[in-house]
Image (spheres, helix red, strand yellow):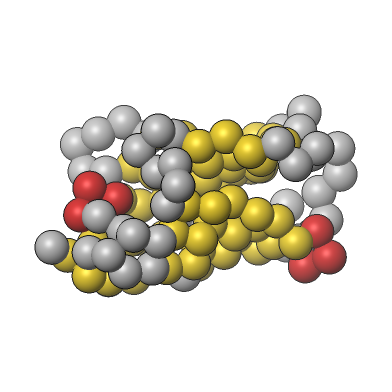
Amino acid sequence: VQLQASGGGLVQAGGSLRLSCLASSRIFNINSMAWYRQAPGKQRELVASITSGGRTNYADSVKGRFTISTDNAKNTMYLEMNGLKPEDTAVYYCNVDDRTDDYWGQGTQVTVSS
């Protein structure tokens, strides 16, 4: 299974972007799906996650601004990002945990200008 992240780009502060993560095939027995990000010189951090039961979790820094969702029919996960801030600038990675393996997308760059 391969994950392809897309939707990143350059946006002004206060703007919005929607990231997508497309799986090359259906993934069975998903435990959770998540978006991580890594800014230059910083460690990769969890941005948002969603369990197979639909329970979501967000980093404090993005609560109220970002929304994670999935479309199982399209094998796709999304991250809706509103009210973007310069500190949201990072490479965003999607991740899927199917209880056996850990899959990662290639990353998509999000740059927020002030």
Front-lying residue, 55 or 92: 55
Residue 32: percent from left, percent from top:
70, 36
- Residue at image location 34% in from the left, 60% down from the top: 83
- Residue at image location 59% in from the left, 51% down from the top: 68
Front-lying residue, 99 or 33: 33
**Location of residue 60 with respect to 75 vertically, above or below:** above
Q: Is residue 105 visible?
A: no
Question: How many marks can you see?
Answer: 0
Q: Is residue 83 visible?
A: yes
**Location of residue 1 with respect to 55 vertically, above or below:** below
Which quadrant of the view contains residue 47?
top left
Front-lying residue, 51 or 24: 51
Residue 113: percent from left, percent from top:
17, 65
- Residue at image location 21% in from the left, 43% down from the top: 40
Q: Is residue 44 left or right of residue 21?
A: left
Residue 55: percent from left, percent from top:
70, 36
Q: Is residue 34 left or right of residue 42?
A: right
Residue 62: percent from left, percent from top:
40, 43
- Name the quarter where the C terminus is drawn: bottom left
Which quadrant of the view contains residue 76?
bottom right
- Residue at image location 40% in from the left, 61% down from the top: 82
Of all residues, the one furthest to the left in this rendering is 114
**Location of residue 46 with respect to 72 vertically, above or below:** above
